[in-house]
Image: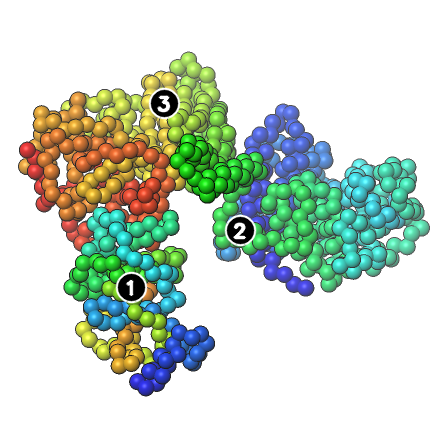
Amino acid sequence: MTNAAQQTNNDVSPGSGSEDEQQYLTFIMAGEEYGVDILAVQEIRGWEATTVVPNAPDYIKGVINLRGTIVPIMDLRSRFNLERVEYSPVTVVIILKVETERGERVMGIVVDAVSDVHSISDSDTRNSPELIEDLNTEFIRSLVSIDDNMIILLDVQRLLTIDKQLLNLATDVAADNE
Amino acid sequence: MSIDLSQFHQVFFEESFEGLDIMESSLLALDLSEVDSEMINTIFRAAHSIKGGAGTFGFMQVSSFTHVVETLLDEIRGGERSIEQEHVDLFLLCVDCLRGLMTDLQAGTEPDMSQADELKAKFEAILAGESPDAANSESIEAKAEGSENTSAADDTSDIGWKVEFIPCEDVLCTGNEPYRMFRELQDLAEAENGSVEVVPHLERLPEFSKMHPEMCYLSWTIFVRAAIELSDIEEIFEWVVDDCDIRYQRLADADLSSIEAHHSPDTEETSDQAEAVAADNNNENVSVEETSEIDVAISETPAEKIEQVTEKLAQAVTQQAKKETSVAPAKAPSKTAAKAAENTSIRVSIDKIDGLINMVGELVITQSMLGQLGQEFDVSRIQRLQEGLSQLEQNTRELQESVMKIRMLPISFAFSRFPRLVRDLSKQLDKEVDLVMLGESTELDKTVMEKIGDPLVHLVRNSLDHGLESAEERTANGKSSAGTITLNAYHHGGNIVIEVKDDGAGLNKDRIRNKAIEKGLISDDEVLSDSQVYDLIFQPGFSTADVVSDVSGRGVGMDVVRRNIAELNGSIDVTSTPGKGSLFSIRLPLTLAILDGQLVKVGEEVYIFPLVSIVESIQLEKSMLNNITGNQYVMQLRNDYIPIICLQDIFNIDLEKKDLEGAMLVVVEGDNEKIGIVVDELLGQQQVVIKSLEQNYQKVDSISGATILGDGTVALIVDISGLNNRPLDKNSDDQTQAA
């Protein structure tokens, strides 16, 4: 732990620390701190009204116009089955971008508030305990503790791959159609 | 110096496919009774470019095959052989075969050579069987490949001339092309059953960096082995004799041993390539400079400089790909070539680009005017502001139109395959058919064009197979023995209409009806209007052909045609007159990128209906409404019963159910079925730019895309045919409450 704490002291300064260090943007949701790879973050925006998409899973709040691109917005609270809250002026949307086999994919996630940027070395991370495999633990890449706080590092790639859920959705629809 | 040639492969393939298209269309246009020598030349050049390119890039299967094709073409071109129908057929087969080979090579798979070998054998049979001296009359490159020159040399080595040709350095600037002289010399020699050998001398060549592209550093020794008068040879060099050093010597006196010394394998290869390039250049009218540049490259000491030659070649090919006949900078490796490997490209006429640049210029002027106005604005100048804004609006619209035009191609791109198709099919079916194509310059979006190709092919095949009668039948019915198929394209409103018309028997209503009853599509006693009957042919699994032929008749076609067209937001209609023929008319939007839309409001959301699919908008009255099975309402509109749906049910939006009575209803038509959609409010109509939802999200049922409205918010575009095809029982639990 001490190791990790030392490293956070000079976290944002470039070139510090060991080679395998990566910077993470952390945000707060329901009192917990989560982190995403900063290279996957395209920008941070305030919440704005979305256009509802028909028959979307309830965690997809809709789509917005991001300088000419249609970008879906996902409510991370409802994605993680957390209690929903009213959106406030500090509610932020983190626009994430990942490379997939179909090309670049951009999506926004709604979180309570943005927290900090930390440099974290891979060697300091711990695997999340083997709990019951469910949807939510699937997105967790690892855990790391900084200044006695645990940060949950998320796998952005998986988070943005809604296809699996779509598959379920599709089968549901198919079942409906029978 | 080595260079990765594979980056130029894509360009080579594009060029070659183009060459094949040229060959094909020229072959089809060839009138055998009156052969146009320019046409033969065109075919020959196309074949030659493909051969040269294939050789350079190491596709030996292609180049050796093309070589025999070219040999026969060359004989025809030289007038040694007249072109027969049999040849044309064979050449067309070759075009197909080459296309197959190229496609395989492009995909990186080993091509299937069986057909090529078969055709090659046929060619060799023609060449050998009908002209025993074929070997002697082959062109320079055959010699340069070194197959038979020694034997030829032995026979005639004691007669003829040795010509030392040392041109001045700026011979190319005076418009004289040594290659052409050699060619003439060869024609001369061949007329006497002799041969010509050209040996280049490379001694005067400076370092590569010091070379001037317009200078000629080469000299040649030419051995003319034929009984020709010296004056004939002198005549060929007449134009350059003042500037160049030319020495003639009787071959019997000349030292023959020097030939062998120069004639190393590397030289062969180089000169072969050189000629390929020279032919390419002729083909594309590339200016003299470029030719000389390549000459220069060749004249480097062959053994180690071949790579440079190939680089030049690749550049030459790339330059042609750009279709710019001006000389491109010699050194700059083309970026487009590398890009082309991964992207599909589009050729845009320079006029369109110029227009675009003009438009942007005006936009900048308007912008600066508005900017100035904004800096010192007061209320008195509001009129000028309005003027400026309307000017901006006009600029924007014009700019949008010009950008759209860039994607537009004349429909002849889609039509060009039909002459061949009709020719082959009419032979196969033994029918006489004239193909008439109209409106070929009508422009259409490239994406639409690509997708409309297959449906069109299907329609033309159908017309040929089912529509047109056999020659006997036609004569018996008092028609001319040759049937006519007309392809027509024209703009109509914001759409393009493509028509496929035949003057055949027309659709047989009774047969269609019987067939539909047999297939269970309609019941015995159903009364159908003519258009409803004709519409049956678009049903899946429907075919009226009594005999299932190779061409059509499996009944998988017309429904696919309709579906493909519906995917493009288009529609297809058929009209027919018994005994006179039928007309299929396809209506397509000009572009897939922009749509004329009707904005409607449902709850808080704005949706867009494609304007083309809207039939009418009405206010519902109680008398129009009928309730069936308790939860589904239909509306009587004149003679039709139209199902009524609420978008919130289909889209699962939480909204209070509204009273249907007095509600606004938009009647839309998709897939030839009408439905009524209840909306809260009709907003304006406007053109919307279609954005993809799938790019970052996924395909959504009944939604064809999204767009951005003037206020920056996103609105979804409703897919009408998708709505129609949606499973009907989906909203059975959300019941619509009527008054």
Mark 2 Cα shell of 10 Å, populated few (<14), some (14-19), many (≥20) = some
The quadrant in which the C terminus of chain B is found is top left
Mark 2 lies on residue: B340
Mark 1 lies on residue: A159
Q: In this picture, is A3 found above or below B719?
A: below
Q: In this picture, is B330 found above or below B597?
A: below
Labels 3, 1: front one: 1
- The image quadrant that residue A138 belongs to is bottom left
Mark 3 lies on residue: B582
Spatial separation of the CA atoms under disc 2 and disc 3: 42 Å
From where the camera sits, is residue B463 visible?
no
Labels 2, 3: front one: 2
Q: Residue at x 39, y 57 (%)?
A: A104
Q: Are marks 3 and 1 in contact (CB under 8 Å)?
A: no
Task: Give the mark nearer the N terminus: 2 vs 3.
Answer: 2
Which residue is nearer to you in this view: B127 or B221? B221
Horizontal relation, residue B185 to residue B714: left or right:
right
Q: Is mark 1 on a helix, strand or loop?
A: helix
